[in-house]
Image (tube, rainbow, N blue to C red):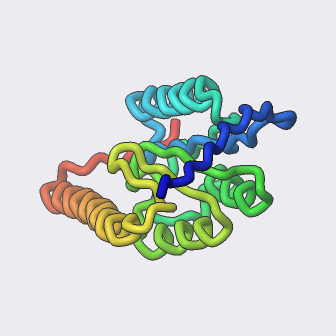
Amino acid sequence: MAKKVTVIKAAKEQKHTQEERRLKVCGYARVSTGSQAQATSYTAQVEYYTEKIESNPLWEFAGVYADEGISGTNVKHRDEFQMMISDCEDGNIDLILTKSITRFARNTVECIQTIRKLKEIGVGIYFEKENINTLSEKSELFITILASVAQGESENISSNNRWAIQKRFQDGTYIISTPA
């Protein structure tokens, strides 16, 4: 008995009448001091994200949000960060690109809370240095560990600075700056 073979012809490629939806992508940059070296880093980060996003045909440029001279230990005074989160909630952003977890936040609790909040509304964050996308299933454990390290690093820097100032006071070498 011969087997019956059914031939299924390939469907013609359909042309999309509507353009594929592009991801609305923004960059986030932050530097913690207003020093000249940090100002150069700030400018470089803004230029880098603008170029990176605009050159990707699958992405729609949603801006670069950047906080200059602001610590990452608290979101309260980070106006651009807060504006970015608000724009995510309004549906204006699908993906945030940032250099590293330490640029995004140096407070473990705030970092995780913000990531979860954005994840719930479908917004991902891609940390370039760590190569982590928050929308991937395995990301939260790594992010929690790295955010804890970032917070500890910040606390250590503050502690070292405080110790140095106290030591200079004790030695009588501390110079109090006065406004000109």
Residue 103, above or below 137: above
Compared to residue 127, the image places residue 43 above or below, namely: above
Taking the image as shown, residue 151 lies to the left or right of residue 32, namely left
Q: Nearest the camera: 161 or 45?
A: 45
Image-based side of 55 in relation to 41, left or right: right
Tell me: 5 left or right of 21: left
Total number of numbered discs in the rendering: 0
Residue 171 can be seen in this image: yes
Residue drawn at (51%, 27%), measured in percent from left and top? 48
Rendered residue at 19%/49% (across/down): 173
Q: Nearer the viewer, residue 159 or 95?
A: 95
Q: Residue at x 63, y 38 (%)?
A: 64
State the residue at coordinates (86%, 34%). Answer: 17
**Residue 87 image position (x, y, % from top left):** 74, 55
Point out the residue furthest to the right here. Answer: 17
Could you say which is closer to the camera, residue 117 or residue 110?
A: 117
Whether residue 162 appears in this view of the structure is: no
Q: Quadrant of residue 57?
A: top right
Q: Position of residue 4 (x, y in %)?
A: 56, 53
- Residue 176: x percent and y percent? 35, 49
- Of all residues shown, which one is farthest toward the left? 171
Q: Quarter-wise, where is residue 88 in the image?
A: bottom right
Q: Residue furthest front?
A: 1
Say left or right for 43 vs 127: right
Residue 137: give x, y in percent of width and height.
Answer: 43, 68
